[in-house]
Amino acid sequence: MKRKEGNQVFGIIGTGRFGLAVAEELLDRGKYVIAIDQDSQRLKPLYETDAEVFVVNDISKESLMDAGIQDADTVIVGIGKDVESSILAALNSLELGVKTVICKVISDDHAKILKKIGADVIFPEIEIGRRTAIKLCERLAEDVLPLSEEFSIIQIRTPKELDGEMVKDIKIRERFGITLIATVKDGKANGSIGPDTMLHEDELLVLSGTNKNLARFQDSIEG
């Protein structure tokens, strides 16, 4: 894939399971990816893709420059267990001028150090666990996006009892304190939701609100 003007460039440093999954998703979305790892075997799944792949001997600033990491808009550091290498990769990326550096972390201390040098952090296992727990609790939800411990966006199939109803009649905000953001049909979203929007059983509803209120809404449907 040639670099196109305006196309985001993502650097992936460390292509274990986490880094590889991020790289493959970005490639599927048409983004330009620079993938870096010290282990050529870990990079092997990306050799037949459009990613620009580099095997490096170390995570020095020089090695990252040779790979072109300074051209990335965002760098994702997928190195977990080797905390020293993770911090070095983040620090060198930031010093090379990368605006956003996101790091996989394995402990609170690891996260604190990275935050102090200006990197963002993510605990993949915790995020997956939280999302799984919410999804188990939200029985009708087909997908869940937790925005905080208290607030989420969920996607559910339009219940039969709401088929043909207008938004103004079901009074979802007044009764449950949640917001209908959009409807989705055949993969196409409609974000122009108004009082006269009619709901259909063959659509998905995208709803936002506190987890407690979203649960109340689903309980009312099941009940």
Image (tube, rainbow, N blue to C red):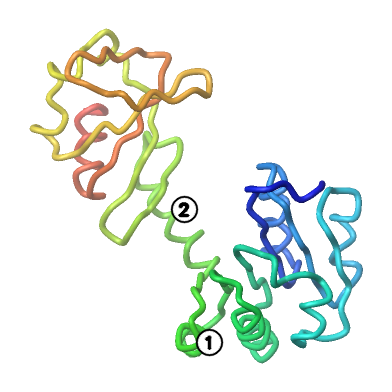
Residue density around tag 2, few if under 14, some if 14–19, many if 20 or more, within 10 Å: some
Q: Which kind of residue does numbered mark 1 sit on?
A: His
Q: Could you tell me which secondary element the residue under label 1 belongs to?
A: helix
| Pointers 1 and 2 in contact (C-beta within 8 Å) | no
Left or right: 108 in relation to 93: left
User: Residue sitting at 39 percent across and 23 percent down?
Assistant: 190
As drawn, which residue projects farthest toward the left?
A: 174
User: Residue sitting at 17 percent across and 19 percent down?
Assistant: 195
Where residue 65 appears, as percent x and y from the top left, is 78, 77
Where residue 171 appears, as percent x and y from the top left, is 12, 25
Left or right: 222 in relation to 31: left
Left or right: 143 in relation to 150: right
Quarter occupied by residue 206:
top left
User: Residue sitting at 30 percent across and 15 percent down?
Assistant: 199
Q: Which of 203/130 is in front? A: 203
Where residue 70 appears, as percent x and y from the top left, is 69, 72
Residue where numbered disc 1 is placed:
110
User: Residue sitting at 90 percent across and 55 percent down?
Assistant: 47
Any mark on residue 189, and which?
Answer: none
Q: Which kind of residue does numbered mark 2 sit on?
A: Thr
Whether residue 150 is situated above or below residue 108 in the rendered picture: above
Where residue 132 appears, as percent x and y from the top left, is 46, 53
Residue density around tag 1, few if under 14, some if 14–19, many if 20 or more, within 10 Å: some
Report the quarter where the C terminus lies: top left
Name the mark nearer the viewer: 1 or 2.
Answer: 1
Q: Could you tell me which secondary element the residue under label 2 belongs to?
A: helix
Q: Which of 204/194 is in front? A: 194
Any mark on residue 132, and which?
Answer: 2
Q: Which of 13/3 is in front? A: 3
Whether residue 27 is situated above or below residue 42 in the rendered picture: above
